[in-house]
Amino acid sequence: MEGIIFVGLGGFIGASLRYFLGTAIETGGVIPAATPAINIFGSFLIGILSIISERYGLSRHSAILMLQTGFCGGFTTFSTFSLETFSLISQGKVTHAALYSILSVLCCLLSVAAGRALTELCL
């Protein structure tokens, strides 16, 4: 039961911060800017947390559950990314949608790898 409370708290904080940043970041460009920026940062953070969790055997610890499952899960958003991609396709901007999708996924994967690599160096 304790884990659920920590995950919920982390999710609330992550989702609230995502909303705040999403409204604060200008999105007047050709492709949406806020969602990829948030997802890239969240991917970097979850990469850091995954190494800490693995290194210290904390996968079920309340703090890791709150940060990794709750905060990162609430902060990053695949559904918004999918809707934005669909909207670009619906507007006939198929090339922009493809570029947005490929760059978003690639940058998020690279961010996880960078977070893990940086944490490995520091621990």
Image (tube, rainbow, N blue to C red):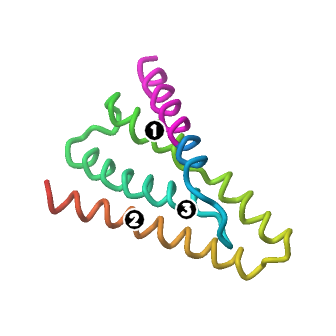
- Give, as a three-letter code, the residue at label 3: Pro
Which quarter shows the C terminus? Answer: bottom left
On screen, 34 above or below 99? Answer: above
* First in sequence: mark 2 vs mark 1: 1
- Give, as a three-letter code, the residue at label 2: Ser
**What residue did someone put label 2 on?**
111
2 and 3 marks in contact (CB < 8 Å):
no
Dot 3: element: helix
In the rendered structure, does residue 88 fall within the stretch colored magenta?
no
Residue 54: numbered disc: none
Instruction: Say which residue appears at 47% left-offset and 70% top-offset.
Output: 107
Of helix, strand and loop, which mostly describes the magenta segment?
helix
Residue 48: image location, x then y, percent: 30, 53
Instruction: Say which residue appears at 53% left-offset and 47% top-offset.
Output: 21
Q: What is the number of callouts on the image?
A: 3
**What residue did someone put label 3 on?**
36
Instruction: Say which residue appears at 50% left-offset and 73% top-offset.
Output: 106
Locate residue 94: give its quadrant.
bottom right
Mark 2 or mark 3, whichever is nearer to me: 3
3 and 1 marks in contact (CB < 8 Å):
no
Q: CA distance from mark 2 to mark 1?
A: 17 Å
In the rendered structure, does residue 5 fall within the stretch colored magenta?
yes
21 or 77: nearer the eye? 21
Quick check: 72 left or right of 101? left
* First in sequence: mark 2 vs mark 3: 3
Residue furthest bottom as drawn: 95
Residue 71: numbered disc: 1
- Give, as a three-letter code, the residue at label 1: Phe
Quick check: 23 left or right of 67? right
Residue 63: image location, x then y, percent: 32, 31
Residues in magenta?
A: 1-17
Dot 2: element: helix
